[in-house]
Amino acid sequence: MIRKVLVILLILTLVISQTACSNGAKEVGEHTGVVIPNPKDGVPTLTIMLNPAEHEALTANKFFRYYVDKFKKDFGVEVNYEKLGSSPGRLIEWEDRDEYIKELSIKLNAQNGSELIFSQFMPLEPIIRQGAAVKLNDKIPNLNKVYKGLLDDEIYFVPVSINYNSKIINIEALKSIQMEEPEINWTSQDRFEIRTKWLKVNKMHFNAYEWFITLESILDIDKAYDRENNRISLNTPKIIKDIEYARKYILGGNYILNKNYKLENYFRMITDDNSEEFQESMYLMKKNKELGHIESGVLENILRAIDVYNANYIYGTVLMPEFSDKEVMLKASGFTVNKNAKNPELAYEFINGLLSNEIQMRLYNDNEDGYYPVNKDIEDNIKAIEEEKVADKRVLQTKKHVLNQMKDSQMKLWNTENLDLLNLKQMIEEDLVKIILADTKYSDVELSAKLSELEHKYNIYLNKQ
């Protein structure tokens, strides 16, 4: 599923808005505590670096345009964009990410550079690791308004809005297999149990989506990684047993399979978005949905209770949060500040304004892209609105559960997740396709030897620096 992260992120756009424009310019930093010196070389500029796809989404968003226009008028500055990379007009692939990071890294070494780096589709972890970003803990007063669980101890990336995806369960399908709605704090195994029971009486077409769901349900790759020692262990009795079970689960009768498919077909289906097999997989996903899949419905940001309530009502679903036995990874839109920025104080002011109660409340009300505010101080205001409009108490309880997660624990933001680990997970998933869906089943000796070989390869990769 990691391989599809960039594709999924691309369909999402940022909602950032502002209140009505004031008359006349403000003194910079007037209400925020941020002090910006008057420039000696004319009108100051604030420049935002971003990928072309992000630029397209951001500048097309009327609320963000409004915020930028107001910022320009209030503080007498110019706001510019600097596009890096070359992926406009198409889905972002991993090679686009690598090209962007390389170009961005070079730009950040220049003195008097652009101030802000925006992130929604593109990761920022490499530039943070190379020391090119400003530590923002004491630079932005409104950081104290952000849910603690969304911030690292050392803050280099500031989320402005977030998307917490839901999991979908169709209520009628659930009733047809005599199962109750899951508890809100359900686990990945609860979901797998529901899907397995459903598949016993409702044959579904095997496709790339079913592969990823089955793989993550049976093999917990994250638990094979030792963070303290930066090593991965694969040749273990538990993983060998899980691999054998996954092969039996997929090929042993739970799914309708294409009888003409060999390993090479499955591999292209799962790893090559441009292949005929992948296109067929997309068709089969749609066909499964038409047949009445247990997970048929519309995906919503589970923090937006009104949207979730409406989706449940229209599609007969119950939308569930992420699993309680897995780390929660959120999609976010936000900014990092360049350490070599020409006008860093302007960047602090820009971010600080986006985190204010007024603007974050406007972000919630406008809801152009389904993202949710990061400001905890407006939680009661939003609660009052949703309690008036949402009749289903379970929806409100689910949202409360998620908010408590954000208050009590650090959630992983995709924007700053370790890219080496993301790359590693993709490598493992692709190699597991070759093992689990092999034309001929590996013997125990062959499987152990193969896992030892892969384990050695992965650990060399992890310790290459």
Image (cartoon, helix red, strand yellow):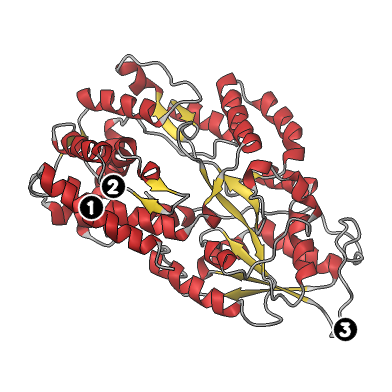
Above or below, 221 against 272 in this view is above
Which residue lies under the disc numbered 3?
40
Q: In the image, 104: left or right of 348? A: left
Q: In the image, 129: left or right of 91? A: right
Disc 3 to disc 1, how far (Cα)?
63 Å
Label 2 is placed on what type of residue?
A: Leu
Query: Mark 3 or mark 2: which is in front?
Result: 2
Label 3 is placed on what type of residue?
A: Lys
* Other-residue count near label 2 (Cα within 10 Å), few / some / many at <14 / 14–19 / ≥20: many
Q: How many marks?
A: 3
Quadrant location of the C terminus in the rendered image: bottom left
Q: Which mark is residue 234?
A: 2
Instruction: Classify mark 1: helix, strand or loop.
Output: helix
Residue 10 placement (x, y as % from top left): 47, 57
- Residue shown at 7% from the left, 47% from the top: 440
- Residue shown at 34% from the left, 58% from the top: 459
* Other-residue count near label 3 (Cα within 10 Å), few / some / many at <14 / 14–19 / ≥20: few
- Residue shown at 33% from the left, 36% from the top: 217
Do residues under tags 2 and 1 come within 8 Å of each other at their CB atoms? yes
Q: Which mark is residue 23?
A: none
Q: Residue furthest top?
A: 178
Which residue lies under the disc numbered 1?
452
Q: In the image, 34: left or right of 213? A: right
Disc 2 to disc 1, how far (Cα)?
7 Å
Q: Earlier in the sequence, mark 3 or mark 2?
A: 3
- Residue shown at 46% from the left, 60% from the top: 419
